[in-house]
Image: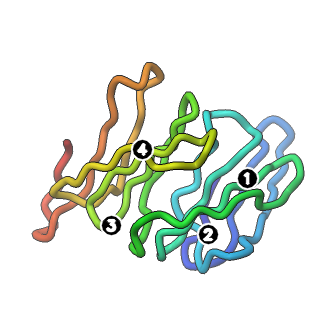
Amino acid sequence: LGGGGSNKYFYVLDIENGKQLKLTCKVLSSANAPCFINGKNQLVAVSDHWGRMEIWDLKAKCCVKVLQTDTKKIITSSASVHNILAIGSIDKTLRLYDVRNWRCFYTKSFECNGDSLHLTDDLKYVTFAGRDENKTDRCV
């Protein structure tokens, strides 16, 4: 799974069959921080520079949901397990969404951009890492 950066497309690689699927976003101006919803191969979330996300059904090869977050900033990272979608953004905020209703139920601000994040399978822990204004690496 790979984003197209400033482009409106992203790729899904089928490692088993050696095939590559290129999907073009409908609303997004760029394609960043893609992730499989719940770690399964049916839904993919992909984001842009304006705080929007498209949710794609890979079997149908179409966008099934457009989500506007409460930020207009670049979404820089995402991860998903057990019906939770975690997103990090350049506004230094971690957001957690329930993918059953696509509502944000948790936000927390940090002193660094959310360039990298990960959720543990038991949902007890999340890593959130990035750089601060002084370009200093931070991990929380």
The residue labelled by disc 3 is 90
Query: Where is the C terminus found, in terms of image quarters?
Result: top left
SS label for mark 2: loop
Could you tell me if the residues under marks 2 and 3 are in contact, i.e. CB atoms within 8 Å?
A: no
Query: Can you give x and y, in whole percent of width and height, for residue 116 in the image?
Result: 36, 50
Name the residue carrying label 4. Answer: 105
> Does 127 sit above or below residue 111?
above
Q: Who comes first in sequence, dot 4 or dot 1?
A: 1
**Marks 2/3: CA–CA distance:** 18 Å
Q: For residue 4, which numbered disc appears in the image?
A: 2
Residue labelled with disc 1: 12
Residue type, label 2: Gly
Disc 3, SS? loop
Tell me what residue is drawn at x 32 percent, y 56 percent. 114
Q: Position of residue 69 (x, y in %)?
A: 47, 63
Question: In terms of sequence position, does the residue under pointer 2 or pointer 4 come before the other?
Answer: 2
Between 29 and 19, the one nearer to me in the picture: 29
For this orientation, the residue located farthest to the top is 122
